[in-house]
Amino acid sequence: MINLILRFGLFFILLIVLQVLLFNNIQFSGYVNPYIYIMFVLLLPVEIPSWLLLLLSFVMGLILDFFSGSPGMHSSATVLTGFVRPFILRVISPRDGYEARSEPSMMAYGFRWFLIYTVLIVLVHHTALFYIEVFRFADFFRTMLRVLLSSLFTVTFILLIEFYRRGR
Amino acid sequence: MRNLLNFLIRFNNLIIFLILEGIAFYLLATGNSYHNTRAVNGIRGLTHGIEERINNTRNYLNLRQINENLAAENIALRNSIEHLIKEENSLFFSVYDTTYKQQYQHTSAEVIENSINRQKNFFTINKGKRQGISIDMAVTSFNGVAGVIVGCSDNYSVAMSLLNLDFKLSARLKSNGYFGSLTWDGRDYLHAVLGEIPQHISVNVGDTIETTGYSAIFPEGIMVGTVSNFEKRGGDFYKITVSLVTDFKAVHFVDIIGNLEKTEQLGLEKPFK
């Protein structure tokens, strides 16, 4: 248990550092803004109580908000993601259900399952984030394009990190 | 009572979700006034420290370009001084001119955090209230419009970049003085859109767009950019695409301009608005 908390604490800090120092500085045409910090919400254990999941998502979003000077933008999107996660897990559950005390990772459930899971979560998060950012439905399809392109990059980076974790 | 408890237990996730989402949207709605609250200032101070370090590294890597820009600005300033000296020598010049009063005050500052990839971009500069910066001052970079100060702490200020969907600027065509409202459409960091220019005006590609000075924030005649494209859209107005003179990807040093007569102008205009 302590081990788990320590591990996720480190992962939490690592993701924030990566996001703030590296990915927030990718300023590529305004259409590609990968937000890989959502990987934290993605990888929390399956059996985590949902209040804790919501709270942790909120804290993650809040810290990102402080660093990017956008109060409430990231936190509202991550809380929504944390809320939706159990439903997504239920919908795409493997045939034999989830193993006890497992994490929804590529190691445990395979590449195909993890890809679907990541794409769904990232799409939910990015859609919420980008539409909250512009806060209007003018240019609806351009925002959609930003969502799709950024999601593509976020998913790619998350898969790379996940492959690295598995390889180790 | 038991029904209520059952209800709470059953929907506790939903309730927590709604509470947290409520907090988030409250923060979102109150916008940037959070800069003024003390608790947040501490955390901002911490992140500023980190941002300043990142920026130091970045500046080091861009030294060549910064030097080139500074040299170019020096030349421009020297030319304008030359012009003034000549005027002073060739005309009668009254030293005690009571009608003359300094209207604008300039302060230079360094940008320590900047973004161009969001829809609502802000940048942070390393001067604040203690250095005389206040809200609604104009920010320019190498004589091009960059943004407006929207929040100040003791030693830092946050400015709304021109690259922000909420940014509005009164700008005009230099050639004929017709003015309209300049906004950013969120497409890319090189272009903005000038609206409200009637279609009977002749517009050419390459025309200079400058500020009008009507808003008491920007002085008159600061360059915004040049016309890169214009089209007649149904209705009475042009849709003019302006290619911006400020390179927001390379904004390192900015000039903050305070209008010393702002309160007088706004106070006078107030009853009529």
Image (cartoon, coloured by chain):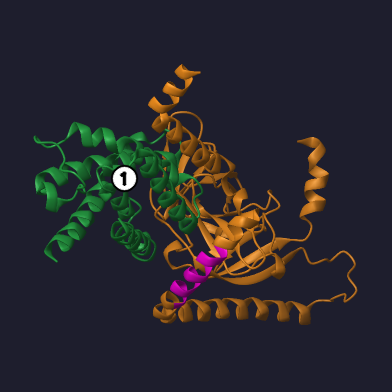
Give the quarter of the figure containing the C terminus of chain B.
top right
x and y, in percent, of residue A69 in the image: 50, 55
Left or right for B92, reference B255 = right
| SS state under label 1 | helix
* Residue B205 appearing in the image: no
x and y, in percent, of residue B57 in the image: 42, 77
B149 above or below B19?
Answer: below
* Region in magenta: B44-56
Give the residue pinned by disc 1: A146
Q: Which amino acid does label 1 sit on?
A: Arg
Taking depth in this image into account, of B163 and A51 the one nearest to the observer is A51
Q: Number of numbered discs present?
A: 1
Instruction: Examine the image and state in which quarter residue A162 appears.
Output: bottom left
Crowd tier of the residue under label 1, counting other residues whose Cα lies within 10 Å: few below 14, some 14–19, many 20 or above:
some
Left or right for B130, reference B3 = right
Instruction: Examine the image and state in which quarter residue B75 appears.
Output: bottom right
Taking depth in this image into account, of B170 and A125 the one nearest to the observer is A125
Chain B color in figure:
orange
Magenta stretch: dominant SS? Answer: helix
Q: Name the residue at 29% across, 38% down.
A: A85
Taking depth in this image into account, of B205 and B225 the one nearest to the observer is B225
Q: Which chain carries label 1?
A: A
* Residue A131 appearing in the image: yes
Q: Name the residue at 84% across, 76% down.
A: B93
Q: The green chain is which one?
A: A
Q: Which residue lies furthest to the front in this view?
A: B2
x and y, in percent, of residue A31 in the image: 32, 50
x and y, in percent, of residue A24 in the image: 37, 60
Let me know if residue A118 is in the magenta part: no
